[in-house]
Image (cartoon, rainbow, N blue to C red):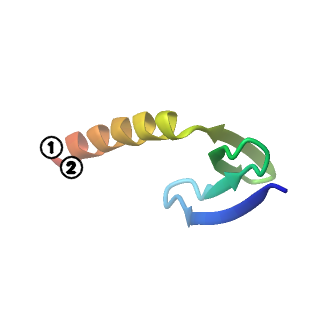
């Protein structure tokens, strides 16, 4: 059986999108993925990503945020 647990949920201040991060654990195969759900009005965008991709994505976002903060 697949289990889903909430990691984080927040709203973007400029635009109001709802972002929800969930951990998806698949019973068969033991794989865990991070589900990113972005809700804009009635539209949803959903990504299921592996730990390596999540790490690369988060590092790129951190570099960008640190650069903007440093200006």
Q: Nearer the viewer, residue 35 or 45?
A: 35
Image coordinates of residue 26 in percent, x first then y, are 75, 49
Q: Quadrant of residue 4?
A: bottom right
User: Is the C terminus in the top left, top right, bottom left or bottom right quadrant?
Assistant: top left
Instruction: Please say if 52 is above or below 39.
Output: above
User: Is the N terminus in the top left, top right, bottom left or bottom right quadrant?
Assistant: bottom right
Q: Residue at x 67, y 40 (%)?
A: 48
Q: Quadrant of residue 46?
A: top right
Find the residue positioned furthest to the right: 1
Badge 2 crowding class, 10 Å Cα cut-off, few under 14, some 14 to 19, many 20 or more, is: few
Badge 1 crowding class, 10 Å Cα cut-off, few under 14, some 14 to 19, many 20 or more, is: few
User: The residue tagged with tag 1: helix, strand or loop?
Assistant: loop
Image coordinates of residue 65 in percent, x first then y, are 29, 45
Image coordinates of residue 40 in percent, x first then y, are 70, 50
Q: Residue at x 78, y 46 (%)?
A: 43
Report the Cα–Cα distance between label 2 and label 1.
6 Å
User: The residue tagged with tag 2: helix, strand or loop?
Assistant: helix
Find the residue positioned furthest to the left: 70
Horizontal side, residue 18 vs residue 60: left or right = right
Question: Residue beneath label 1, please?
Answer: 71
Q: Residue at x 24, y 43 (%)?
A: 68
Q: Nearer the viewer, residue 48 or 10?
A: 48
Q: Nearer the viewer, residue 64 or 71?
A: 64
Check if mark 2's residue and mark 1's residue have beta carbons within 8 Å. yes
Image coordinates of residue 59 in percent, x first then y, are 34, 39
Horizontal side, residue 12 vs residue 34: left or right = left
Q: How many marks?
A: 2
Q: Residue at x 64, y 66 (%)?
A: 6
Question: Residue beneath label 2, please?
Answer: 69
| Circle on res. 56 | none
């Amino acid at each position: 059986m697949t289990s889903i647990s909430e990691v984080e949920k927040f709203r973007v201040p400029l635009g109001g999108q709802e972002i929800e991060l969930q951990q998806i654990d698949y019973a068969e195969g033991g794989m865990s993925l991070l589900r990113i759900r972005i809700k804009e009005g009635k539209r949803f965008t959903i990504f299921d990503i592996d730990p390596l991709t999540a790490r690369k994505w988060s590092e790129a976002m951190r570099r960008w945020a640190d650069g903007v903060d440093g200006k």
